[in-house]
Image (cartoon, grey):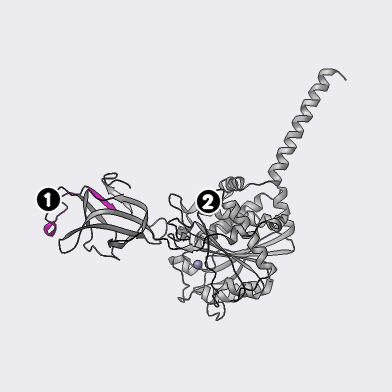
């Protein structure tokens, strides 16, 4: 063989080898960061989860159907909305996931849709094929479509479905129990949202995601399934730690005799509860992505068996959820103008109400005057200003809607007319609508 041809061949085969290695790596070693990138590329749930109603879910599911995901109508809500179950894989190990049994807890509904879309479009990847061969995953996105429609916790009968596991007065609870009893899955994932101001332990730090491995009885009797789920939860914590370290909590594990997670575990399907909170500066879609990374990492660890060598203490040692005195907004040291015209220097705290993303943000005064040790996600130095409540009542429970006036201005508060006496800054619906930046951040 001519020497130069030979060298070229050598180069080519070396190149080929490196390509093969690269492909193999990407097929078998999906890092959490790579999974996050894959979500960016493949997700199909386009709305903010809190804005997605039953009609939007049907659009997402139609897309999944067109990708040949089996989707069945398995029941109807009290008001007659269809409840669906989707399936991926044909393996012997059964995993069951359900979301939004509380209507205003929507994050994981989008994640389930996105996860199924990703799996189905990537069946040629060796590790996805392995999931398909070894597992059967069934998921019910939006178990409570009536609650989702009006963005409330309860169903249309005003029942908390998650307190109806034994009474079974709601059609949604009856359905959930039937789907479990008929199929007898080995692992359950119960997918919820917690309050946006839930903290990790007593630190004023948001719990963006909290996990709970649910026991099957009040005595917390150990079991193989429970130990396995502790290891799986630890795998999820390890993956999430690459994005949101310090913002992962452990949900309180008191036995709730009427809740589904507890009863699924008692009935033979040990449950991992996932509660998505919020993270300052990040929107709902970021949390959809975090759920995507956590779910797929968990599923992978089950398929590969890597969960068996995971130290469960990563989950066990998570700080428990707390209410670490966190509020949405704090205005420190302001001259608070009360309704009788008196002015007293103090702090104001406010809390954002849970609303759909497309709705105007609503904030409510949670503390006035001496507010103790609470910390705000946003804190302002009000010491140069007097503050008037825009709508009339400076009192806790009223809207956090404020006019800010420089303190050196002489103003008669009893005859205040803002058309004449223009405020220096206006805080409304959680934003500075006038004079942005005038009241300094602390
Ligand atoms: Zn819930």
> At numbered mark 2, what does the secondary structure look like: helix, strand or loop?
loop
Q: Residue at x 15, y 47 (%)?
A: 408
Of 70 and 155, the residue lying toward us:
155
Q: Which comes before the other along the chain, label 1 or label 2?
A: 2
Q: CA distance from mark 1 to mark 2?
A: 49 Å
Residue occupied by mark 1: 410
Instruction: Give how far across and how far down residue 102 sits, in percent.
Output: 49, 68
Instruction: Give how far across and how far down residue 428 sits, in percent.
Output: 29, 54
Judge whether 86 appears above or below 12 on screen: below
* 425 part of magenta stretch: yes
Judge whether 121 appears above or below 165 on screen: above
Tag of residue 4: none
Horizontal arrangement in the rendering, residue 47 relative to residue 390 (left or right): right
Residue occupied by mark 2: 245
Judge whether 168 appears above or below 331 on screen: below
Instruction: Give how far across and how far down residue 172 sits, in percent.
Output: 55, 73
Whether label 2 lies within 8 Å of ligand 1 gets the answer: no
Whether label 1 lies within 8 Å of ligand 1 gets the answer: no
Q: Residue at x 60, y 53 (%)?
A: 238
Q: Residue at x 63, y 75 (%)?
A: 266
| Quadrant of image for the N terminus | top right
Mark 2 residue crowding within 10 angstroms, few (<14) / some (14–19) / many (20+): few
Residue 66 appears in the figure: no
Of 269 and 336, the residue lying toward us:
336
Q: Main secondary structure of the magenta part?
A: loop
Q: Where are the magenta residues, as a range? A: 406-428
Q: Quadrant of residue 61?
A: bottom right
> At numbered mark 1, what does the secondary structure look like: helix, strand or loop?
loop
């Amino acid at each position: 063989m001519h020497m130069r041809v030979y060298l070229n061949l050598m180069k080519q085969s070396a190149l080929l080898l490196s390509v093969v290695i690269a492909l193999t790596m990407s097929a078998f070693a999906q890092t959490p960061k790579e999974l996050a990138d894959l979500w960016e590329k493949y997700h199909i749930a386009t709305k903010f989860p809190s804005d997605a109603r039953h009609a939007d879910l049907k659009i997402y599911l139609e897309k999944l159907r067109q990708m040949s995901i089996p989707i069945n109508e398995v029941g109807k809500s009290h008001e007659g909305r269809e409840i669906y179950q989707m399936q991926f894989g044909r393996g012997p190990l059964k995993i069951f996931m359900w979301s939004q049994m509380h209507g205003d807890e929507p994050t994981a509904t989008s994640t389930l849709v996105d996860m199924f879309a990703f799996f189905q479009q990537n069946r040629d990847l060796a590790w996805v094929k392995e999931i398909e061969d070894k597992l059967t995953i069934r998921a019910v996105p939006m178990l409570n479509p009536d609650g989702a429609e009006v963005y409330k916790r309860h169903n249309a009968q005003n029942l908390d479905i998650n307190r109806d596991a034994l009474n079974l007065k709601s059609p949604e609870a009856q359905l959930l129990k039937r789907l479990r009893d008929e199929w007898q899955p080995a692992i359950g994932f119960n997918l919820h949202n917690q309050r946006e101001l839930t903290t990790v332990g007593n630190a004023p730090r948001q719990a963006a995601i909290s996990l709970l491995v649910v026991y099957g009885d009040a005595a917390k009797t150990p079991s193989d399934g429970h130990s396995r789920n502790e290891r799986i939860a630890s795998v999820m914590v390890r993956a999430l730690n690459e994005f949101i370290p310090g913002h992962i909590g452990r949900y309180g594990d008191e036995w709730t005799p009427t809740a589904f997670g507890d009863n699924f575990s008692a009935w033979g399907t040990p449950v991992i509860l996932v509660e998505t909170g919020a993270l300052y500066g990040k929107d709902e879609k970021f949390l959809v992505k975090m759920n995507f990374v956590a779910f797929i990492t968990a599923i992978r660890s089950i398929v590969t068996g890597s969960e068996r060598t995971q130290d469960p203490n990563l989950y066990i040692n998570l700080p428990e959820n707390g209410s670490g005195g966190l509020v949405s907004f704090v205005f420190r040291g302001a001259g608070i103008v009360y309704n009788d015209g008196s002015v007293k220097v103090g702090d104001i705290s406010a809390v954002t109400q849970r609303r759909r993303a497309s709705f105007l943000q609503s904030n409510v005064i949670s503390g006035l005057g001496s507010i103790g040790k609470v910390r705000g996600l946003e804190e302002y130095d009000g010491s140069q200003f007097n503050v008037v409540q825009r709508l009339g009542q400076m009192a806790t429970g009223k809207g956090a809607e404020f006019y800010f006036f420089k303190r050196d201005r002489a103003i008669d508060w009893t005859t205040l007319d803002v058309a004449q006496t223009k405020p220096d800054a206006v805080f409304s619906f959680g934003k500075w609508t006038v004079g942005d930046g005038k009241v300094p951040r602390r």
